[in-house]
Amino acid sequence: MKKKLLTLLLLTMLSLSACTQNGASNTLNVEINDFAFTPNQFSIPAGEQITLHATHNGLVEHDFVIMKLGTDVGGHFDDEDLANVYWQVRIQPGASLTATFTVPNEPGTYQIVCAMPGHVEAGMVGTLEVIK
């Protein structure tokens, strides 16, 4: 019984250590498939440095693009959307990558998309909730 309780306590401490006080994580772990981000919703703290760990299990090249606050690519990503990109990383099929970026200071919901032609239309979208 004591061993089970200790194991549960350790697992709880590990999961809490990966989060900030407001429940937002400083790490984004995402699996990329053709054509989805898993998970596709994230919560991160405003103004902090974030580490993205992405694993690409699909067959075609993808992007992980965070759009600026208040912008939405609509039905598809095109050249007009380039000016509204906050941060972007490209990942090749079968690859994994780790990258860092600094989160905007302004809380709100930011759209995540894959900028490759046809990928937004195929459902490669998500949201990034920035929390103060």
Image (cartoon, rainbow, N blue to C red):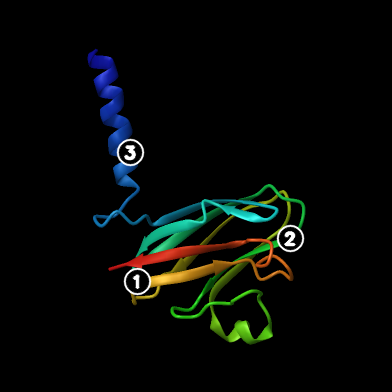
Residue at disc 2, secondary structure: loop
Front disc: 1 or 2? 2
| Amino acid type, residue under disc 2 in the picture | Glu
Position of residue 131 relative to residue 10, above or below, is: below
Structural crowding at the residue carrying mark 3, measured as other residues with C-alpha within 10 Å and reported as few (<14), some (14–19) or many (≥20): few
Residue corresponding to mark 3: 14
Q: Is residue 55 left or right of residue 42?
A: right
Name the N-terminal-most of marks 3 and 2: 3
Instruction: Look at the picture and state if 98 lies above or below 64.
Output: above
Which sits earlier in the primary sequence, circle 1 or circle 2? 1
- What is the quadrant of residue 98 in the picture? bottom right
Question: How far is disc 3 from disc 1 in space, using C-alphas?
Answer: 23 Å
Residue type, label 3: Leu
Residue at (34% x, 77% y) in the render: 106
- What residue is shown with label 1? 47
Badge 2 is on which residue?
61
